[in-house]
Image (cartoon, grey):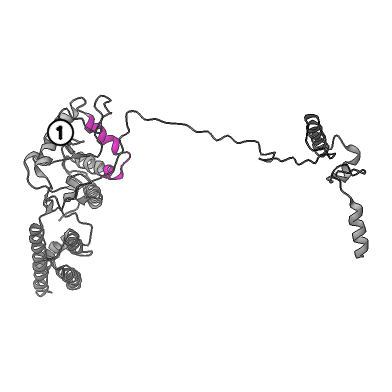
């Protein structure tokens, strides 16, 4: 294996190692953030996929896990056998180490390419110990009771990294799903480039779509991918009678969309209109509310009243004489007196320059004839003298 870091004297189509590494990193970030498609993803949220016939092919997953563990066990055995030929036969050890490096074991790549190497024995033993521990942990899972998460855990244990396991999925209603995919072209007859534009716009606001956009763009730059953005296959559940319209297009007031629908935008391999089982990566998903064409609205304003006065005010007055009923002139006189007293109690310093030094002070009503409510400090002084 030869790693090239510089490009002089190399053919024009040569892919350098830094470029290949960047492509691999982009693909790993993309695939590592995705999850496998499950039966519930292929129907409406209100429908229970398991009760409606949706299922995952557990037999296929079991066979794949058994093949993985068998291959791992054989690779460990091959490395152990090659280790027994040291220190003389070093090439078989290097070959076995390279094979084991595909499991993502750090330090599995030999430091030398030929000849004697005193470190190969310790290196081989370290890789054997690591892979044997992974094999023991993965092999301890009871496959007869395993669920999708258990199968994913086995692959992640063996490779010590995020691993996207794509099971074969049977949709709850395969006939309906096939019919929905069959309407893909008809959904965008008014704007055939809308899916490509929509995908480009999403790459700026959805992190998952942005990772996919980067992975496809880098692959295209290396000439290992088709034209990007890829052609999207559309479907909407539940399907409605024609003419249906893609939910990502601007709303048509004449044909408002039905509520509670699921819209698929898929990069497909093969024809989804005639498949009985599906397998795929779920790149991103989100709910989106479709507004009504018309709605009654209202705007409320909060009016802040002046806070310089009390919110309630009560004027309590006593009749100055012993008459049985009040009359208008008497009420007007009481109100007038109240306003005059209020003005006297709210004077500013400019109006009372001579007594400004003793303010603030209290103003009390005084009526020597006891014709109305009055304050008598003399009583307080007499009480104070008596106490003293």
In the rendered image, residue 32, in percent from the top left (x then y), is placed at 24, 52
Query: In the figure, 264 relative to 155: above or below?
Result: above
Q: How many marks?
A: 1
Asked if the stretch drawn in magenta spans residue 207, the answer is yes
Quadrant in the picture for residue 296: top left
Q: Which residue is mark 1?
A: 184
Quadrant in the picture for residue 139: bottom left
Compared across the picture, whether 100 is left or right of 314 comes to: left
Which residue range is magenta in the image? 194-211
Q: Quadrant of the C terminus?
A: bottom right
In the rendered image, residue 130, in percent from the top left (x then y), is placed at 20, 69
Q: Which sits in the foreground, 148 or 322?
A: 322
Query: In the figure, 215 relative to 71: above or below?
Result: above
In the rendered image, residue 385, in percent from the top left (x then y), is placed at 93, 61
Q: Residues within 10 Å of mark 1 (few under 14, many from 20)?
A: many
Quadrant in the picture for residue 96: bottom left
Query: In the figure, 171 relative to 143: above or below?
Result: above
């Amino acid at each position: 294996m030869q790693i090239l870091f510089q490009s002089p004297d190399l053919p024009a189509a040569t892919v350098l190692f830094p470029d290949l590494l960047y492509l691999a990193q982009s693909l790993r970030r993309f695939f590592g953030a995705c999850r496998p498609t499950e039966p519930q993803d292929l129907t409406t949220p209100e429908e229970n996929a398991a009760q409606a016939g949706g299922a995952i092919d557990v037999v296929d997953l079991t066979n794949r896990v058994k093949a993985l563990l068998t291959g791992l066990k054989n690779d460990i055995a091959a490395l152990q056998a090659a280790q027994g030929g040291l220190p003389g036969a070093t090439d078989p050890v290097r070959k076995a180490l390279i094979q084991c490096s595909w499991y993502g074991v750090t330090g599995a790549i030999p430091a030398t390419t030929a000849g004697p190497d005193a470190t190969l024995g310790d290196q081989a033993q370290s890789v054997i110990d690591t892979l044997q521990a992974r094999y023991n942990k993965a092999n301890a899972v009871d496959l007869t009771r395993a669920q999708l998460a258990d199968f994913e855990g086995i692959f992640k244990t063996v490779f010590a990294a995020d691993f996207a396991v794509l099971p074969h999925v049977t949709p709850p209603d395969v006939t309906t799903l096939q019919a929905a995919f069959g309407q893909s072209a008809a959904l965008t007859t008014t704007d055939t480039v809308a899916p490509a534009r929509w995908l480009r716009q999403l790459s700026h606001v959805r992190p998952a779509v942005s990772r996919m956009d980067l992975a496809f763009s880098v692959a295209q730059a290396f000439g290992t991918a088709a034209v990007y953005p890829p052609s999207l296959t559309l479907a909407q559940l539940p399907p409605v009678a024609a003419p249906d319209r893609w939910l990502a297009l601007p709303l048509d007031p004449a044909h408002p969309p039905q509520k509670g629908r699921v819209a698929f935008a898929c990069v497909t391999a093969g024809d989804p209109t005639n498949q009985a089982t599906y397998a795929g990566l779920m790149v991103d998903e989100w709910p989106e509310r479709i507004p009504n064409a018309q709605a009654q609205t209202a705007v409320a304003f909060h009016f802040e009243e002046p806070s310089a006065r009390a919110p309630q005010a009560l004027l309590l007055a006593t009749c100055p004489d012993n008459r049985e009923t009040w009359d208008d002139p008497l009420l007007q006189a009481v109100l007038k007196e109240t306003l005059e007293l209020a003005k006297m109690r709210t004077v500013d310093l400019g109006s009372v320059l001579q007594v400004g030094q003793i303010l603030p002070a209290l103003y009390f009503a005084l009526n020597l004839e006891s014709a109305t409510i009055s304050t008598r400090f003399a009583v307080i002084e007499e009480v104070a003298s008596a106490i003293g």
